[in-house]
Amino acid sequence: MRLMSLSTAAGGVALAAALLGAPGAIRASRSSAEQELLAAQRSLISANNRADLAMVDQLTADEWIGINASGFIRTKATLRDEIAKRGPAKVQATAEQLLERQKEWKVRIYDTVGLVTRLTAGDHGSRSWISTVWVLGHGRWHRVLSHETTAAEE
C-alpha cells in the first residue's frame, strides 16, 4: 500500500519535527482517533514481540523508514528479515505486560497524520525513546516512519 512517499530519512524526521510544533494538536482527553491510533501502536508492539510478520506487515506502509538508535536506516523488507531472524521475544509477555514496559506516551493527531512517542523498557535492546509517524488511509493507521533514540541514564 502506497500512502506517503518519504524520499529520505531526513525528510521524514523533518516531518515529525514539524508535526510536534504544528497548531491544532489534540492534547486533552483521548479522542476516538487517538484511541484508534493507540490501538494500532499497541497491536504493532504486540506483533513485534510475537514476531507476527503478517500483522507487522499490515500495520507498516510499504515505504516505511526506520532509523535505529545507532543511526542505521531500515526498510520494510529489512525489518521483515530482522524479525524473521530474531523470532519472538525470549520472554513472551501478555499485551498488558508489554504496555507496562512502555512509558510516557505522547500522542498527537493532525488530521490524517498521527505521532506517537514513548519510552520503552528495552525488550530487544537498551531503553529507548521511539517516535512513530502514522498516516490514516483507507480507514486504518499505517506507520510511515519510526525513529529510535537511546534513553539517557536516570
Image (cartoon, helix red, strand yellow):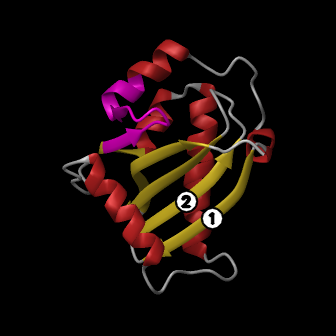
- For marks 2 and 1, the one nearer the N-term is 1
Residue extending furthest toward the front: 153
Closer-to-camera residue (147/99)? 147
State the image coordinates of residue 99 (x, y, percent, origin top left): 74, 46
- Compared to 76, does 141 lie above or below? below
Residue that extends furthest to the bottom in the rendered view of this protein: 24
- What number of labels is visible? 2
Q: Quadrant of residue 67?
A: top left
Dot 2 crowding, Cα within 10 Å, few <14, some 14–19, many 20+:
many
Q: Secondary structure at mark 2?
A: strand
- Which residue is at a point 66% across and 22% down the rendered structure image? 89
Determine whether, in the image, residue 71 is placed left or right of residue 46.
Answer: left
Residue 10 to residue 137: above or below? above
* Left-right relation of 89 to 44: right
Asked whether residue 99 is drawn in magenta, I would say no
Residue 127 x, y percent position in the rendering: 67, 38
Characterize the local packing of mark 1: few (<14), some (14-19) or many (20 or more) Cα atoms within 10 angstroms: few
Q: Is residue 73 magenta?
A: yes
Rendered image: mark on residue 106: 1
Helix, strand or loop at label 1? It is: strand
Amino acid carrying label 1: it is Lys
Residue 138 in sight here: no
Residue located 71% across and 17% down the image: 90
Q: Are marks 2 and 1 in contact (CB under 8 Å)?
A: yes
Q: Quadrant location of residue 122? A: top right
The residue labelled by disc 2 is: 116
Which residue of the protein is positioned furthest toward the top in this rendering? Answer: 85
Q: Position of residue 21 (x, y in %)?
A: 45, 77
Q: Which residues are magenta?
A: 64-80
How many angstroms separate mark 2 from mark 1 (CA)? 6 Å
Residue drawn at (76%, 21%), measured in percent from left and top?
Answer: 91
